[in-house]
Amino acid sequence: MEMTWFYIAVFLAISDEIHSRIMWGVFADFYILLAGVIKESVASNIRLWIVHESMEAFFHFVILSLVFLSLEIGLLAALIHMLVDIYHEISGIELNPLGHRCLHFVIESIFFIVIFAAGVPA
């Protein structure tokens, strides 16, 4: 089996770190103001959170689509990342940042192993 699944998981982790550092480091004030505007528009914390996760997924979609020159990989990576974030939040599991990153990496790796294994004849 190719190592593509591994590279996708690694670049998705890098993309998540870039997103965090850009949004909370460089554009923190803008990000907070944007959250306020979105919250007033959607009038619900749950909807605000879903909009936030969707915007983050779009960021990952763009980054991974460019890195792998594949819209399919970008879309799948963004969706699985968003699903892991949603599951993690709904489940109430408390993890430190390293544990959170490990959770993402393991589930995203397994997802892409399954995706790429399905295309390989036995």
Image: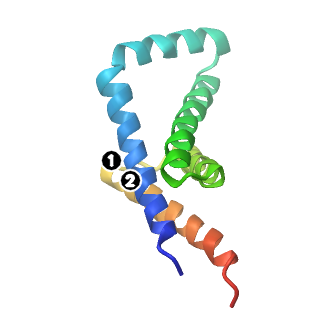
Q: Residues within 10 Å of mark 1 (few under 14, many from 20)?
A: few
Q: Residue furthest bottom?
A: 122
Q: Quadrant of the C terminus?
A: bottom right
Q: Position of residue 70 (x, y in %)?
A: 60, 53
Judge by depth and name the residue closer to the eye, 76 or 97. Answer: 76
Q: Is residue 47 left or right of residue 92?
A: right
Q: Residue furthest front?
A: 69
- The reply to whether dot 1 and dot 2 touch (C-beta < 8 Å) is yes
- CA gap, disc 1 to disc 2? 6 Å
Q: Is residue 40 above or below residue 100?
A: above
Is residue 24 at least partly visible in the picture? Answer: yes
The label number, if any, that marks residue 8 in the structure image:
none
The amino acid on which the numbered mark 1 sits, given as a three-letter code, is Pro
The amino acid on which the numbered mark 2 sits, given as a three-letter code, is Arg
Q: Quadrant of residue 28?
A: top left
* Residue to which mark 2 is pinned: 101
* Colour mode of the rendering: rainbow
Circle 2 sits in a helix, a strand or a loop, which is it?
Answer: helix
Q: Is residue 62 above or below residue 41?
A: below
Q: Residues within 10 Å of mark 2 (few under 14, many from 20)?
A: some
The residue at the point 69 percent across, 76 percent down is: 118
Judge by depth and name the residue closer to the eye, 38 or 112. Answer: 112
The residue at the point 56 percent across, 30 percent down is: 55
Judge by depth and name the residue closer to the eye, 97 or 75. Answer: 75
Q: Is residue 121 left or right of residue 68?
A: right
Q: Is residue 42 above or below residue 90?
A: above
The residue at the point 58 percent across, 14 percent down is: 39
The label number, if any, that marks residue 97 in the structure image:
1
Circle 1 sits in a helix, a strand or a loop, which is it?
Answer: helix
The residue at the point 57 percent across, 66 percent down is: 112
Is residue 91 at least partly visible in the picture? Answer: no
Q: Position of residue 76 (x, y in %)?
A: 63, 53
